[in-house]
Image (cartoon, grey):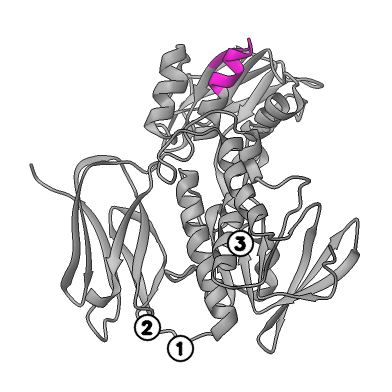
Amino acid sequence: MELASKNWDVIVIGGGPAGLASAVAAHDRGAKVCVIEREERPGGILKQCIHDGFGVVRFKEKLTGPEYAHRFIEMARERNIPVFLNSFLTDITYKDGMYTLALVNNDEGAFYSNAPAVVMAMGCRERTDRQVFIQGERPSGIMTAGLAQYFINIQGFMPAKKCVILGSGDIGLIMARRLTLEGADVEGVYEILPEPSGLTRNVVQCLEDYNIPLHLSTTVTEVHGKNRVEGVTVAQVENFKPIPGTERYIECDSLILSVGLIPENDIIEPLKVPMDPKTKGPVVDQNMMTMNPGIFSCGNALHVNDLVDFVSESGDIAGEYAAKFSTNGTHKRNLVPVRAEGKVMYVVPQYLDVNTKNKATIYFRSSETFTNARLTVTAEGEKIISKKFRIVKPPEMERVVVDIDKIPEGAGEIIVELKQEEK
């Protein structure tokens, strides 16, 4: 199937759960759509996530990562949506209402494709040891949790015999269990924060159920070993600084890192798409359109999600409105900023287009853990939503649905505030 010099209504960059969902949604609304995927198979990171727990929200059943991805792959196949594999986006430019994408793959070589709407669904990448300033040599045996997962689940290699896991993100917790099941000695999980950064269910199912220690307010301060990791030094921390005298040496052959995820958005830097410093993703409205008309963002490229179900949900929205945009062109947006207040860490979307008369889903995270939380959404002093949460935690994203019709005409901003209620 030729891709070179083709014109499309919507081009989706990324064949993971967000990209496939957006392509299906765009197709179902009449758009001529294709997907550009850099790997040899679609499915994104889900291909190596063989544990279950996916699809509970969307499909009302527990699926493994490959099973969840397969459902969307089949949806795309049933609609004959072209998914171009081993294909890379190298540049993107904009002129006269059309985006021109410079692409390269083995079949076509270097070529260009055009579309008035582009959905960015590139996912996210893991932080490395140098990005969290770990001192010491750079021996083999230091790897991200995702790489360790790829070694075991895809390649069938055992990357560690005795390891330390730094960071209690979800993939780090899941890999603590996976490595233990494969026979490795997981000495412990070390988290610099005073509370876990992964979901509570993963702390229970992956650590507590397997008697794997979790050490909070503790971090790795140094790596030892020249050719291969021989051990690490850990220390307790206060205000993110090691406490002298608390250092402890641990003998191990591997250091597994689960120290955060960064949305992949480097390729759109030339377009000067405004970015949110909190989420590290683009600023968008409720239709997942960025401040650049025709550029949409969804999934973990927009902000890091806890559940793949919400990744697909944002893909649905982006695909639907990308199709509408490509067919009808942009309508005049009336963007009202959404501001986080109180104990809200961030909100997505950062704007609501009040000229789009639909219901808008607002995703948010709390800045700290506390109980008896009350969320309010107000505009011009008028309360639009008031919702109580028994407990909120920074690792666990929450969401509310706002009726655009309830926003007062001429509202200057919408305030999303989270505070603790007295019992």
**Image vertical order of residue 291 relative to residue 39, above or below:** below
Q: Quadrant of residue 91?
A: bottom right
Looking at marks 3 and 2 on the same chain, the residue that comes earlier in the sequence is marked by 3
Q: Amino acid at mark 1?
A: Lys
SS category of the residue bearing label 3: helix
Give percent across and percent down for residue 162. 65, 13
Residue at image location 48% in from the left, 64% down from the top: 317
Q: Which residue is mark 3?
A: 23
Mark 1 lies on a secondary structure that is loop
Q: Residues within 10 Å of mark 3 (few under 14, many from 20)?
A: many
Q: Which residue is mark 1?
A: 332
Q: Real-space Cα distance between discs 1 and 3? A: 25 Å
Q: Of the two numbered discs 1 and 3 on the same chain, state the one appearing first in sequence.
A: 3
Can residue 229 be seen from the camera position used here?
yes
Residue 355 tag number: 2
The residue mark sitting in front, 1 or 3, is 3
Q: Position of residue 382 (x, y in %)?
A: 16, 73
